[in-house]
Amino acid sequence: MSTLPKPNSAPPIASIGEAQHAIANLERIMDALLATVEEETALVRSGRVTEAARIEEAKSELAGRYLAETERLKANKNAMKADAKREERERARAAANGETSDPAAGEPEET
């Protein structure tokens, strides 16, 4: 399960792009955790309890990463709200001026 990035000691989320990345990371962790639990359940149902027990470490690691990333997002929710509101105001200003905004470029484009 080493393909999923581990959150560092909860670095602050400084932009909407970073927030989107953190949310995507949380989704990957959730998918991996779900697959692990489903695998464990299938092994237990088939009577292969010893094999199921070997999955425990991976499941625990994923659960810890899920908790850490969730806490990181919670800790930054006010900053993310403020960034989203600021971006919305910028879009409204650009629309009022007849511009389209390309959030990836960070610059408005003339239409």
Image (cartoon, rainbow, N blue to C red):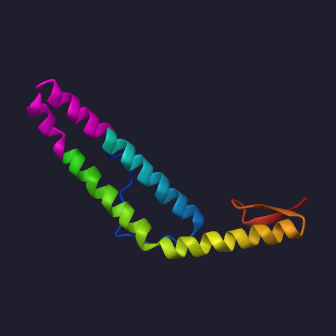
* 101 relative to 32 in the view: left or right: right
Quadrant of the snapshot with the N terminus:
top left
Please check the rendered image and state whether residue 52 is part of the magenta-colored stretch, yes or no.
yes
The structure residue drawn at horizontal position 25% and vertical position 33%, both measured from the top left corner, is 39
51 lies above or below 61: above
Q: Foreground: 106 or 90? A: 90
The structure residue drawn at horizontal position 54% and vertical position 70%, both measured from the top left corner, is 80
Quadrant of the snapshot with the C terminus:
bottom right
* 81 relative to 62 in the view: left or right: right
- Give the magenta part as a residue range: 35-56
Residue 88 location, quadrant? bottom right
Please check the rendered image and state whether residue 37 is part of the magenta-colored stretch, yes or no.
yes
Q: Position of residue 14 (x, y in %)?
A: 54, 72
98 lies above or below 89: above
The mark total stands at 0
The main secondary structure of the magenta stretch is helix
Residue 82 location, quadrant? bottom right
Q: Position of residue 94 (x, y in %)?
A: 82, 68
The structure residue drawn at horizontal position 79% and vertical position 69%, both measured from the top left corner, is 92
* 44 relative to 18 in the view: left or right: left
Q: What is the residue that sits farthest to the top in this orientation?
A: 46
The structure residue drawn at horizontal position 53% and vertical position 63%, both measured from the top left corner, is 18
Q: Foreground: 28 or 91? A: 91
Q: Position of residue 6 (x, y in %)?
A: 35, 57
